[in-house]
Amino acid sequence: MFTNVKRSFRRRDQEVLALDDVSFEVGEKEFVAIVGPSGCGKTTLLRMAAGLDFPTSGSVRVGDREVSGPGPDRAVVFQQFALFPWKTVEENIAFGLRCRGIDADARSRIVASYVELMGLQGYERAYPQQLSGGMQQRVAIARSYALDPDVLLMDEPFGALDAQTRVVMQEELIKLCRVNPRTALFITHSVEEAVYLADRVVVLTRRPGRIREILDIASVRRREGWDTYERIEEVMDLESFVHLRTRIWRLLRERQEDAAPAGIAVKSA
Amino acid sequence: MHDPKGAAAPAASTGRLRRFRFALAAIVPLLVLWYVLTSVTHTISPGRFPSPNDVLQAARQISRGNGYAGGTLAAQVWQSSKLVLMGFAVAVGTGAPLGLLMGWSRRAEALLNPAFLLVRPIPPLAWIPLAILWFGLGDGAKIFVIWFAAFVPALINSYTGVRNIDPTLVAAARVHGASRLQLVTHVLIPGSMPMIFTGLRLSMQASWTTLVAAELVGAIFGLGHVLIVASLDIYPGMILYAMVWVGIMGALMTKALALLERRAIPWRG
Ligand SMILES: Nc1ncnc2c1ncn2[C@@H]1O[C@H](COP(=O)(O)OP(=O)(O)O)[C@@H](O)[C@H]1O
Ligand SMILES: [Mg+2]
């Protein structure tokens, strides 16, 4: 999907390199998580996949076409939900369908099915600001899923939620992905979240973002039978999970300590 | 939480009742004081400020027969209101769309902003002589001057409204398949609606201010004309009565706008 992608920004006559030589692929129906320190270019990477931003050099492809703008094959879930405050829950979920010219009957059928799937019954006519953060993000996920996209792009979708809601949403997302598997690119700065949800985890370095390592989680998940557990905390207690988590933490940490100036190290000690 | 109307309605109506009582408590003593100072103790001479009786007499005169200064109260109020509404409509009909356009398109902004910056510092009332020269003392001149006065707040606020729209919402609309037109109708217009209404309120105020001023300078009819004729006749009762009607009409139209705003922005409930 990404080949030798570089992206730099100009800021007051200064080139800032945000991403440097990033290449990786996401397989059909594979769930790939990207972790990295903040400012390393995760959002930029996702925006390029969505067609909202473009690489300075290198190429971003979806399927076998170069990304040239937003397209019906991809949908995005944003960290800040990005629901339209002036549309009701129903209207928000129906938005993409409406843009694609799907007729009202089919639209309301699809919306109703996602309202039910996401547990939003009774809130169809509510406005986003009347809902909790968790509910809002359900609406946003429904809005994206309703379009039946080949690729789902999610930028720290649970980052703005409190810890408990977050756990519930993670469990639900994994269920949703089991029922309705999609190719997914999922950005997070939570290592646990990445390991719990993803088939593979791409670890990025501090800015400029480069690929530190790509870890295969799916084979461990299958081997250790993570999917047989209902709850996230049970999986998180497994030795295999802890092992992976620690490894990713080390990868992220290594670079940080290399880069940290002495003054800060003394202060934190 | 889901249906706040049921619980909130009685509280709101008792709140309104209380506010009404406070308003009465503030106004009644003032009216009494007015009566006492002008008609009992004669502290204020009737030449400077009319007594309640003078105002009543003026009210009676202007309501009957040929009225005053060329027409009855109803005719004068209608004349002024009609011009305000027409000038306001022309100003908003041009200002708000231009503001939206300038907020949305950098090219439109670059094209229109210089002209706007040049015209804007000229006080609207300074256009009156030119307007009279062009359109005479009739309706055209007043509508023209109101246009200049009410155009600016309509434009600036709708411009700001577009500029303040969260760019993530625009991105969300695009990735869910919105066309350019759909972006305008589903995101830009509803997104700037609160600011557009702020602009409408300011435009309405500017329309009344300007109209009365324009009628003072050159008119053969209207509330401003009543004011200037009463001033030449040294008729304080009529001056005050006409002023009260300017206030009433301005307040009524502002109230109508507020009602319209509540219907147009239901999500802010
Ligand atoms: N539009 C932009 N203009 C200038 N710099 C940008 C822009 N977008 C992102 N950047 C810079 O690129 C880097 C990566 O940003 P981002 O992708 O948002 O990181 P992350 O999502 O990993 O926190 C940051 O240093 C940020 O300041
Ligand atoms: Mg980010």
Image (cartoon, grey):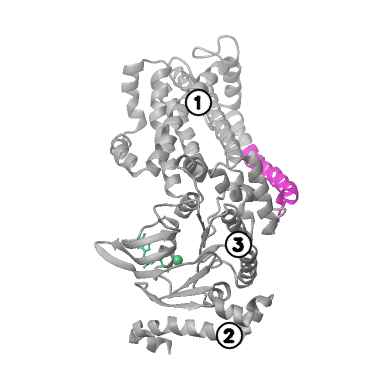
Question: Which residue occupies the foreground of this view, A46 or A136?
Answer: A46
**Residue beneath disc 2:** A240
Which chain's residue wears label 2? Answer: A
- How far, Cα to Cα, is label 1 from label 2? 74 Å
Residue B154 image-quadrant placement: top left
Residue B113: percent from left, percent from top = 31, 39
Ligand 1: which quarter?
Answer: bottom left
Q: Residue at x 68, y 47 (%)?
A: A109
- How far, Cα to Cα, is label 3 from label 1? 43 Å
When the figure is inspected, residue A223 is found, relative to residue A153, above or below; the finding is below
Task: Inspect this view and state whether residue A87 appears.
Answer: no
Identify the mark nearer the N-term, 2 or 3.
3
For label 3, count other residues whose C-alpha is less than 10 Å away and answer few (under 14), some (14-19) or many (20+).
some
The span shown in magenta is: B1-28
Q: Judge if badges 1 and 2 mark residues of a common chain.
A: no
- How far, Cα to Cα, is label 2 from label 3? 32 Å
Question: Which residue occupies the foreground of this view, A188 or B228?
Answer: A188
Mark nearer the viewer, 2 or 3: 2
Question: Which residue occupies the foreground of this view, B139 or A59?
Answer: A59
**Residue beneath disc 3:** A133
Q: Amino acid at mark 3?
A: Gly
Q: Amino acid at mark 2?
A: Ser
Q: How many marks?
A: 3
Q: Residue at x 54, y 73 (%)?
A: A199
Quarter placement of the N terminus of chain A: bottom left
Residue B214: percent from left, percent from top = 40, 24
Residue A154: percent from left, percent from top = 51, 63
